[in-house]
Amino acid sequence: MLDLFKIKNSITEEATSILDFWLSMQDKNLGGFYCYADYTGNIDTEHEKSVLLHSRILWTFSSAYRVLGDKRYLAAAEHCYKFMVDKALDSLHGGVYWLLDKNGNVTDSQKHVYNQGFAIYALSEYYLASGAEDALDVAMNLFYLVEEHAYDVTYGGYREAFDKNWNPIENQLVCDTAEGILAEKSMNTHLHVLEAYTVLHQATQNELVERKLSELCKLMSEKVVDGTLHYGLFFTRDWRCVSGDVSYGHDIEGTWLMDEAAKQIHDKALANKVFDQSYDMACITSVEGVDRDGAVFNELREGHLLDSDRIWWVQAEAMVGFFNAYQKKNAVMLLDNAVGCWNIIQQQLKDKLNGEWYWKVKRNGQPYKGLPKVEPWKCPYHNGRACLEMIKRIDLSNSQTTTKFKNV
């Protein structure tokens, strides 16, 4: 018989291991965190500092303090927060920059909505951890800026890429499709704005935030999810999909993030639609996207080219997504999928010698040597969050048979 609490203890150990690694990434001299470490964990102290990575670090340590209660995590969050508000915020035009040098000077002043969303997400979580009202004020200011400059009144959703003055520019950072198209809108940006507004609403109970979150739930479920229950990845401004690829990692990540958002909205019919749709999407991923040994495939390209590499964030998000779906209806297959992802993480992705997880491994379990442990897109947010979510969810499973997905 499966012992979930034994698994929880193992996951808790893994969470503390990940957090210990990232505690060592603090730059005590120049502020913030180092943003590059090589395959074996050697830190490059000269590397530029990513604002996106800092947001993800701030969220991780804030959430870790809320779940695990270790004051070292709150101190690390405070250290990260100070660097962000001192260096990453544009005091003249508003918003957060994309990239800084090691000293905190701006090297890329783009204002991308993807980046603004993660800053909102992190600042809201930091407020929930620390009670710092100034952090919530910054988060709300970013929310208003996104709504003022990026909201697309004509077609819905958000324009994504802007210069430092909030003038629209080509969307080169997150919308380069396999076909070479620079799409104006992306699933990824909209999913993470939804994620950010979910926590911002938890922190504020603001009516406008709730209304915008409800709009995003409707848009994601009606425009971004396609008829095969996969996310379209890239879109024109008027929501025509311009990519035929399937991202199993984003599909399963989106199922539980959409559920968390739907729990916050007042539209009961829409919330229930989201709950049903996300459950069905998790089942589709289980059928189509899981390898024989339990790993989740990365992508299906052009309808037939399967990328079977095991990527760190895909397995982390799939573990939570499958467990979230299992909590709805007690489908044993989905619990097996979640545990299968955890087994792949422990057996293949965890670097038992140098700490943290490999970026990705081949289908035979061999790591891609040379890929960094830390860089702007290799962060503690996916794997750290997955562990923290599983700790909370397994604790919840001790008190009730199934999770009640009612509109609240």
Image (cartoon, rainbow, N blue to C red):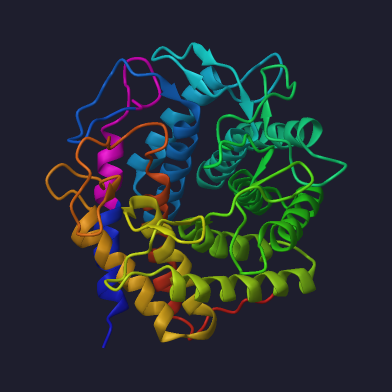
Q: Please, which residue is most extreme toward the bottom here?
A: 1
- What's drawn in magenta, residue-wise? 16-35
Relative to 85, say whether 241 is above or below. Answer: below
- Overall secondary structure of the magenta section: loop
Q: Please, which residue is most extreme toward the right here?
A: 154
Give the residue drawn at x 30%, y 54%. Answer: 15
- x and y percentages locating residue 34 in the rendered image: 33, 25
Q: In terms of image quadrants, where is residue 286?
A: bottom left
Q: In terms of image quadrants, where is residue 291?
A: bottom left
Q: Is residue 132 left or right of residue 223?
A: left
- The quadrant the C terminus occupies is bottom right
Confirm whether the magenta stretch covers residue 25. Answer: yes
Relative to 376, say whether 335 is above or below. Answer: below
Q: Is residue 398 visible?
A: no
Confirm whether the magenta stretch covers residue 197. Answer: no
Give the residue drawn at x 68%, y 35%. Answer: 160
- x and y percentages locating residue 9 in the rendered image: 26, 67
- x and y percentages locating residue 120 in the rendered image: 61, 39
Give the residue drawn at x 61%, y 68%. Answer: 229
- x and y percentages locating residue 131 in the rendered image: 56, 42
Nearest to the observer: residue 9 or residue 2:
2
